[in-house]
Amino acid sequence: SAGSVVRESGPATRQFLEEINKWTTQHGVSPLSRELAVKFLMARKFDVLRAIELFHSYRETRLKEGIVRLQPQEEPLRSELLSGKFTVLSVRDPSGASIALYTAKLHHPNKTGNHVVLQALFYLLDQAVESFETQRNGLVFIYDMAGSNYTNFELDLSKKILNLLKGAFPARLKKVLIVGAPVWFRVPYNLLSLLLKEKLRERVQMVKLDELRKHLPRDCLPQHLGGLLPLDATSWNQQLLAGQNDRVDPVDELVGIPVEETSVHVPGSESMRPQELLNHLGRLQRSGIHQEYEELLKEPPAGSFNCSLAASNQEKNRYGDVLCLDQTRVRLTARRNERSDYINASFMDGYKHRNAYIGTQGPLENTYGDFWRMVWEQNVLVIVMTTR
């Protein structure tokens, strides 16, 4: 029961609430309830740090997508909820998981903005995970593409739905079944797959209509998908709306707190604001900028280049004067019979993440293998070539 789970998960719940409510106190908003804490903890199997990360992803996604203070009885959200595009089926799968259905052919991008679609999805899934049974047994998501064509599809919306399901919603996502996908969907599907971590990629499957029964029994499927269930999305969603009058979303107050833009870079005493930099460049002109760069080159580096300068690694450098700092270089995984883990490549910080990027030389004939090893080992998904 819900009560026994709350009791058994005491230490994790206490730790989660302690951390989150430090943050709510700091922002002067109401503390999070124990029930809500358990919802996030159950979605991450009571791993406190992952549950805290999920809570903030959920909150930030809602703020970013405008899913705040929803008015389900007012337009345009009411029409979207009653369109039948999304619904949560009235039955569960054999393991007790809720089954959510998205019908692609009912989506018309020129008529409905993405934010309204996402509001409807959030609203319906929120109702589904109110149930302790769904919190415990998870969620199956059917993406029904049968009868849809290219005009019903929007890559940006599909990315947002997957991002929401994979890391910004307090539910255990058991699987995503993409049913009846047309031939043209292969390319966008491959693009979407790149965004997913391996664990989730395994849970997203494209299935033909006649294969769907291998995943779910017929009494869990709507009739148009080969099942026995008469689909009545409008009535189901209407019942849901009727029971939600005057309900206050307990997270609304928290969602309204602006996302903190925390940079990994700490401004020094000589740092400039953008307008100051523009004025500075205006004063220096091209010759002054070149001169400033020459002066910077004369300054000693904040680190050492021992590995780049080692005799055994010289043949791996394209240029003798473009070296890697020992402190930030990328190391290849050590292998037997290899003298070095060296490649001419360095980690670079992004705005909010350390080591977000890798800067490397165009590979030489003798470093092609090292280059692709690095791409594989560092799980690189995007390569940008800026040389000729």
Image (cartoon, helix red, strand yellow):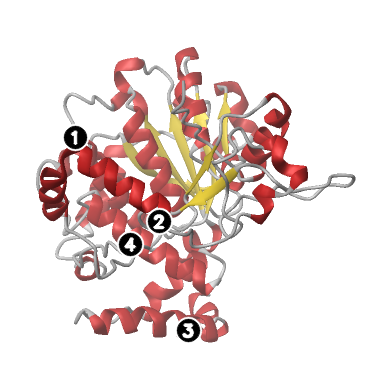
Per the image, the residue denoted by label 3 is 15
In x, y percent, where is residue 54?
43, 62
Please give the name of the residue rendered at 14% of the width and 65% of the height, measured from the top-left corner: 246
Closer to the eye: label 4 or 1: 4
Which residue corresponds to mark 4?
263
When asked about the image quadrant of residue 217, the answer is: top right
User: Of callouts 2 and 3, which one flags the residue occurring earlier in the amino acid sequence?
Assistant: 3
Residue 67 in percent (x, y) is at 22, 53
Q: Look at the numbered discs 4 and 1 and tell me whether their residues touch, using CB distance below 8 Å.
A: no
* Residue density around tag 4, few if under 14, some if 14–19, many if 20 or more, within 10 Å: few
Crowding at dot 1, Cα within 10 Å, few <14 / some 14-19 / many 20+, comes out as: few
Earlier in the chain: of badge 4 and badge 3, it is 3
Could you tell me how far apart the alpha carbons at marks 2 and 3 are, in whole angstroms? 20 Å
Q: Element under label 4?
A: loop
In this view, 259 is above or below 49 = above
User: Which residue is labeled 1 in the image?
Assistant: 113
Q: Earlier in the sequence, mark 1 or mark 3?
A: 3
Q: Outermost residue toward the right?
A: 337
Name the residue that disc number 2 marks: 169
